[in-house]
Amino acid sequence: MKVLGIETSCDETGVALVEDGGHILSNVVASQVELHARYGGVVPEVASRQHLLTLLPLLRTGLEQAGYRPGGRPAGLGAVAVTFGPGLAGALLVGLNLAKALAWAWDLPLIGVNHLEAHIYAAWLDRPAREQPQFPLLALVVSGGHTEILFVPEHGQYRMVGRTRDDAAGEAFDKVARVLGLPFPGGPAVEQAARGVTPGPRLPRPWLRGSDDFSFSGLKTAVLRLAESADYDPRAMPGVAAAFQEAVVEVLAAKAAAVARRHRVRCLVMAGGVAANQRLRQAVTAAVPLPVICPPISLCTDNGAMVAAAGYFRLQRGERHGWDLDVVPTLRLV
Ligand code: KG4
Ligand code: ZN
């Protein structure tokens, strides 16, 4: 069965058609990065307006790339899935209202999807069935808004193991990038600046001993102090970027490994925008004594395919939403 997935929770507009929760027929993403870059971060009003401008043309492209011609309900389409939270209220509304209109017009089930769950389900995409994640599993979700380790016994069931007490990992990357004079979004910029560079000086590791929680705001402040100190030489920037990345990567990998040793699970799924970081992928794969499944890099950041995959598995369990579904900007998994 085919599911249409729509994603507009932040600054990427995404539309995708996915078959049986894993096989991508089309997956088109319009990034607003350049639009927001001059402000150094996502401007919610600008994001909503841009989703509004982009979404219908993107839908047309997504349907065409999956082999459909405009007009009428696409053959074989079984549901419309859409992110309804967490995210920016105005941005979410654009996607949700299109999803409702399409589901209504085509007489299909509407499935609201949690954006974090969608990130996890990116691990099911474009992978042979025997390589898809097996339950029970652990999920490490590292994105711009969230850093969480979850125990996932079965499809759609989540238990919180640890979460950030302050900044999300991606948020720390974005803020540190700004302090170091690197462009938005900070994650890819820091990774690029740090590539092949010797890290230095050494930065503190926020271990929070005895807890599976994370904290990244102290580390961010340490970089800020360093960059503002009188004897800071901007030519040392790549080393500082590398030192910051190493500190984040080391803490995430070591904590994920410790949690993995205490749970009887089949694998660890790492998802969310920060999971695109190559150093993090290497370090977590090396440290965690379990098969580590990361989505392909292009599917780590926001897209419609992951929404369609998550929606497919909810529909399989007979779930669907009514027309009264509203956006929930602070929606949680647990
Ligand atoms: O999942 P995502 O696209 O959106 C949210 O749900 O937040 O994640 C975006 C975040 C941003 O903070 C961005 O800087 C970070 O993911 N990110 C990265 C990399 N690519 C994106 N962080 C580190 N290394 C990367 N290569
Ligand atoms: Zn996301």
Image (cartoon, rainbow, N blue to C red):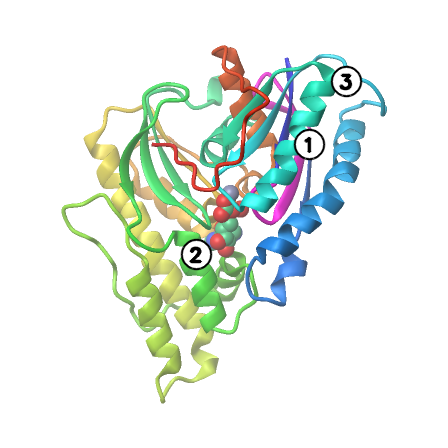
Q: Viewed as shown, does residue 206 lie left or right of 10? A: left
Q: In which quarter of the image is the C terminus?
A: top left
Q: Which residue is drawn at 51% across and 74% down?
A: 181
State which region is magenta: 8-26
| Whole-number angstrom distance, CA of label 2 to CA of label 1 | 29 Å
The CB of the residue at mark 2 lies under 8 Å from ligand 1: yes
Residue nearest the observer in this picture, 23 or 84: 84
For label 2, the SS is helix
Front disc: 1 or 3: 1
Q: Is residue 128 visible?
A: no
Instruction: Name the one closer to the observer, 111 or 67.
Output: 111
CB within 8 Å, label 2 to label 3: no
- The kind of residue on which mark 1 rests is Leu
* Mark 3 CB lies closer than 8 A to ligand 2: no
Do we see residue 120 in this rendering?
A: yes
In what element is the residue under mark 1? helix
Q: What's the residue at 39%, 36% (across, down)? A: 332
Query: Which residue is identified by label 2?
Result: 171
Pick whichever, 148 or 43, lies toward us: 43
Q: In the image, what residue occupies the spot 79% across and 34% down? A: 61
Name the residue carrying label 3: 74
The residue singled out by tag 1 in the image is: 98
**In this picture, is 65 found above or below 225?**
above
